[in-house]
Amino acid sequence: VTLPHLMRLEQLTALSPEDKQVLADAIVSTVTMGPNKDLVRQGEEPVECYLILDGMLQRYKVLGDGARQIVGFHITGDLCDLNGPVIGRMDHSIATVTASKLAVIPRAALLEIIERRPRIGIALWKETIVDAAIAREWVANVGRRTPHQRIAHLLCEMGRRLEAAGRAEDGKFEWPVTQADVAEAMGLSTVHVSRVYQQLRKDGLLVTEDGVVHVLDWHRLEEVGEFTPDYLFLPSSTRQEHASA
Amino acid sequence: VTLPHLMRLEQLTALSPEDKQVLADAIVSTVTMGPNKDLVRQGEEPVECYLILDGMLQRYKVLGDGARQIVGFHITGDLCDLNGPVIGRMDHSIATVTASKLAVIPRAALLEIIERRPRIGIALWKETIVDAAIAREWVANVGRRTPHQRIAHLLCEMGRRLEAAGRAEDGKFEWPVTQADVAEAMGLSTVHVSRVYQQLRKDGLLVTEDGVVHVLDWHRLEEVGEFTPDYLFLPSSTRQEHASA
DNA sequence: CGCGTGGTTGAGTCATCTCAATTACTGTGG
DNA sequence: CCACAGTAATTGAGATGACTCAACCACGCG
């Protein structure tokens, strides 16, 4: 495990070299998982949290009728499932989307670090604050926006986040999430997601091929999705506004 | 400001008497606000957070077309807007629902406390974790559940939370939130909220009068709303299952 | 008395869902 | 090498739930 993986965390809080070393030392092992595997299940009491070294994960809830609601995505560099170890029982599940590599930090080490270095505690806390902010944005997205806007918004969000994680270039990023997954995240039917995608493509906003999204016009896509990146608390973007233009 | 107001915080983390004193000492003043007043606005950079001594607040976002989406409620005993001071800019606004009394904790004091007493930092962090968990539950609620279920679920959530805060008795609690507000929280039209309320009343699940909700049958209401309180991380309830029974 | 707010009712519209069938692609075993 | 199964995406058509619009009621207050 190398330190560069802490890059995303550092975008929220400046960490001293020692801080980073302490965090790196807390990693006891790494695990590799295939796609679509549960990492933690609702109701469990996890004793570790994970730093995503590579891959994409999703958080989801299972509702009464068996329907799934995806309530968030996590990408490379995210710290994921801080909740569990800190507060105890899981209120939702976490699963891989793609094959992923995770660094494991045990609960005890986590708590000990915070006790010893409150500054790291604040850094981790901020991570939770951003998670909460994203969840609230999703509430607004799913609650009030049209399907069109929702999907545009989601793609903008993930584009920005992946970009900040160094996983997007020229408006292209890997997007291994199926239309069925998008439907489960955005509260829509798969059929409708398909139709919205078609419209977005027809409007020249993006191109999809295989598991890659290529956004042709960020400006218009953000306009469509009413997207403003403030809630992600990322350092200001260096992106050029249009891939075309 | 008296210490009992920290009761809700203590439900998440045991605090020593000194911890509580430190927190109480951090309170520099209290403010009183009328109903429906903005406390913090989207885009601002607040330098304080608030402990709600009395009243109910809402977090909301304003969308492109001027529509409002309420993304959460806060009740007496909640620590509210920890985000702002910790992370900087606000991604949403906070307003009172009812007239409220708030204890003010300045940013500097907050950060200093955490540095000095990491355990308090963890307690506050947990508060954020619960906020995030609630937001995720709302995503699922708004994304996948029927209007009927959504409203039942919301009432169950608020009932439980108010109960835990000592603000509900015999299934009765003050619910000063208008149907228009519920509509803005649940992604519905006011007309539809009205019809759902009527149905819930007709089904004998609850009675409303003035700003008070009286739940007649918690069990069935929770069933309707697919409500499970796990995500609130409250100490287990001592409530009797039926008010009727 | 008139006005503003919150809630209710009715009627028509339309967005999105459901159901069902079809295509494209990929990996697997005969 | 081909047949087959399984996954992901697409298309069409009909059903319907929730929305919008608009009127109306009840209440409290200046």
Image: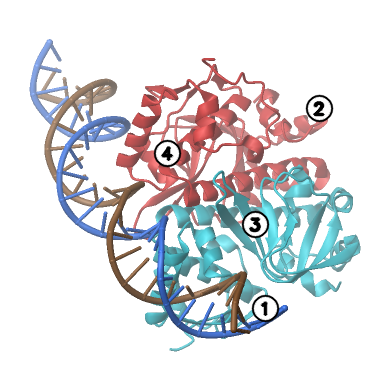
Chain colours: A red, B cyan, C brown, D blue
The reply to whether callout 1 and callout 3 are in contact (CB within 8 Å) is: no
Residue beneath label 1, please?
A: B166
Q: Identify the residue at image location x=54%, y=38%.
A: A226
- Label 2 is placed on what type of residue? Pro
Tag nearer the camera, 1 or 3: 3
Q: Nearer the viewer, residue C4 or B15?
A: C4
SS at mark 4 in the image: helix
Task: Measure the alpha-carbon separation of dots 4 and 2.
Answer: 44 Å
Crowding at label 4, few (<14), some or many (≥20) Cα neighbours within 10 Å? some
Residue beneath label 4, please?
A: A148
Q: Residue B13 falls in which quadrant of the image?
A: bottom right
Question: Which numbered dot is residue A17?
Answer: 2
Crowding at label 2, few (<14), some or many (≥20) Cα neighbours within 10 Å? few
Q: Identify the residue at image location x=43%, y=29%.
A: A176
Task: Measure the alpha-carbon separation of dots 4 and 1.
Answer: 43 Å
- Label 3 is placed on what type of residue? Arg
